[in-house]
Amino acid sequence: MQIIDNIPVWGTQVDEGALKQIRTCYWIFGQAAMMADHHKGYGVPIGGVIAHEHLISPSGVGYDIGCGNKAVLTDADAHDVRANIARIMDDVWSTVSFGIGRKNREDVDHELFENDDAWQITQGANTAAWKLTSLRDMARAQLGTVGSGNHYVDILQDEQERIWVGVHFGSRGLGHKIATRFLNRAGAKDDMDSAPVALDARTQEGQDYIAAMKLAGRYAYAGRDWVCDRVVEILGAKTLDSVHNHHNFAWQETHGGKSLWVVRKGATPAFPGQRGFVGGTMGENSVILEGSTQRSTVPVASWAGWRPRASGTRQPVSGSANRRLPRR
């Protein structure tokens, strides 16, 4: 790790475009850092972390609010899974919906659609009013769908020949439309190098965004839970353990005796003892990280050439029995 203009930057290769972005973030928020796999994003670099007592950034959380990973350890027999991996992944493909705007083939319900006050957020008045409830039917139809791009479902074997299910996706259209709404209201520009939007968490606008963000985060967790449960069911297995975390989100945390809003964009939290799942690229290993108690610990990489994402120790999750779904 090196310090560049008071900003901790991990990794041996520094992306100059991302560095320029995090410098702007530091100037606005006062505290910032970059993980080792950083690269340019919109306003805030991917792998960027920013913090402030009162400011929160929709640009930092990003369009896919609550995007994250879940890994589930199963009791499936590794030999049986390897022998039947083609059929298993075909069953996954026919059960789970992939792609932009896709709806779940099954009717999925969740208590978050009824018991979260964030659905009552209303901006504007009369016929021009925007209501978060206008997104509920779309969100209900998309719950448990995966999306496109680098979002996936994996079946993996670790070094102990145990079978894991790994997924990566976020809050789907719900999060994207929430982010778009608040970014547009704040005057965000469609330019990667523009300064990130900063909302004051003490204002009504800031409070509305935080409530909507948390709702999208609940939604993302519920979606990943549903997909993992269905894949475990396809395997004919039971869940023994799970690791679940966001990497596009904002948390209120205490650091140095101060309460701060910490925004992580493509960065996995790793407090001492906290585990996180970081998926590898296609055909490469994924890892389980655990936060270290040693603040000076250098972030650790996966076994497949991935640069480190967060401080911790590693457990390799091999892709040897993996057939990642094609990007159709």
Image: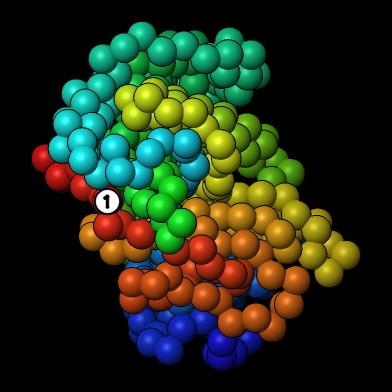
| Residue 43 location (% of width, % of height) | 42, 63
Instruction: Please state the horizontal and vertical placement of residue 39, each as a whole percent of the image.
Output: 36, 71
Task: Classify mark 1: residues with Cα within 10 Å, few (<14), some (14-19) or many (20+).
Answer: many
Q: Where does the image place residue 264, in percent across and percent down from the top left?
A: 55, 58
Instruction: Look at the image and name its color scheme.
Output: rainbow
Q: Quadrant of residue 269?
A: bottom right
Position of 156 with respect to 56 (left or right) is: left
- The front one of 223 and 63 is 223
Say above or below: 226 vs 183. above
Identify the residue shown where x is 59% and y is 69%: 313
- Pick the residue in front: 255 or 285: 285
Q: Looking at this rendering, what residue extends furthest in the left direction? A: 328
Q: Name the residue carrying label 1.
A: 321
SS state under label 1 = loop
Q: Position of residue 55 (x, y in %)?
A: 66, 55
Residue 286 relative to residue 221: left or right: left
